[in-house]
Amino acid sequence: MEYAQGIVVSVVAGYYFVEHANKIYLCRGRGKLRLDNLAPMAGDIVLFSPGKEGNGTVEQVLPRRNFLLRPAAANVDAVVIILAPQGPQPNLLMVDKLLALLVSMKLEAILCVNKADLDPQAARLLAGIYRDAGFASIICSALTGHGMDELSQMLGRRTVVLAGQSGVGKSHISSQIALGQLELPVQVGKLSAKIGRGKHTTRQVSLLPLAGGGKVADTPGFSVFELEMESHDLHRYYPEFLNSGQCKFAPCFHIHEPDCAVKARLQQGEINPIRYENYVKIYTELQEREANRY
Ligand code: GDP
Ligand code: ZN
């Protein structure tokens, strides 16, 4: 029996939608998968046996490069952090925490300043903070459509998850860049009748197709997260701190130490003061948590 290789684009109540050669197969998992504790998740590359009428059986989940739990998605290439100059007021401390987390996970971060139509100048300032720090960042407006092509181009073939505060425009951006809903196989109508609408179905995640061949998760991520890391590791996740030259002390956490190359660059205006202030805040928070741990 020949196996085909496909990608799981949606998971609903123990059914897996596997895309292969521009067609989506409705699959169950081989019992062994459950025994191996390897339930396929959206984004998984799987080997499956295609059956008749677009059905199939998932035989094996290929090794994941990474995975997220909320939303449940595997092999994610990038997280698009969306913020807005206003409505809601940007929470840059949250953005910096999320960036540190993503860098520590070796996940690419793309900054997307939406609602530029409301305040173009503030949008440029925000995008500049993160571009100067070394992150890809773009300015857009899901309302006017400005920047949507640029965002699509930037995402290309990547599998991405959107993140950001409530109200920044995640669902509007998603509906602008996604090519539409998944074209699910015909059996899905019967299936949804069988499993009931929203009843005892685990939260479904679907990957919607993007113009460049990539995919975007239809459920945003990182709405709540705890930054789990050692305070002493935090500085490693600030790209703009690297290549600052030699601090006098090694290791240097760039806070109270004298002759600190990072603080020197801060004074010269080469490191953004908001980024640095938030670094100190996050560092202090992590230290407090560590002090309470014992
Ligand atoms: P989400 O909570 O992040 O998914 O945000 P939504 O996509 O639901 O958008 C929240 C609100 O912001 C809605 O009222 C949208 O109409 C509005 N909105 C989204 N994008 C833009 C934009 O680019 N400009 C403006 N002015 N409003 C926007
Ligand atoms: Zn230093």
Image (cartoon, rainbow, N blue to C red):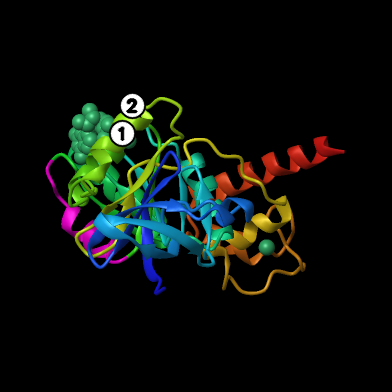
Instruction: Say which mark, if any, is on residue 192.
Output: 1
Whether disc 1's CB lies below 8 Å from ligand 1 is answered no
Left or right, residue 245 beside residue 109:
right
> What residue is rendered at 43% in x and 64% in y?
45
Q: Are marks 2 and 1 in contact (CB under 8 Å)?
A: yes
| Camera-side residue of 167 and 235 | 167
Circle 1 packing at 10 Å, graded few (<14), some (14-19), many (20+), is few
Left or right, residue 174 beside residue 204:
left
> What residue is rendered at 61% in x and 74% in y?
245
Whether residue 187 is situated above or below residue 7 in the rendered picture: above
Whether disc 2's CB lies below 8 Å from ligand 1 is answered no
Instruction: Say which mark, if any, is on residue 4.
Output: none
> What residue is rendered at 42% in x and 62% in y?
77
Residue 108 visible:
no
Which residue is labeled 2 in the image? 197
Q: Which residues are magenta?
A: 144-157
Instruction: Tell me the amino acid under the disc marked 1.
Output: Ser
Whether residue 199 is situated above or below residue 25 in the rendered picture: above
Residue 162, image x and y in percent?
37, 47
| Quarter containing the C terminus | top right
Which type of secondary structure does the marked residue at label 2 adopt? loop
| Camera-side residue of 99 and 255 | 99
Instruction: Tell me the amino acid under the disc marked 2.
Output: Arg
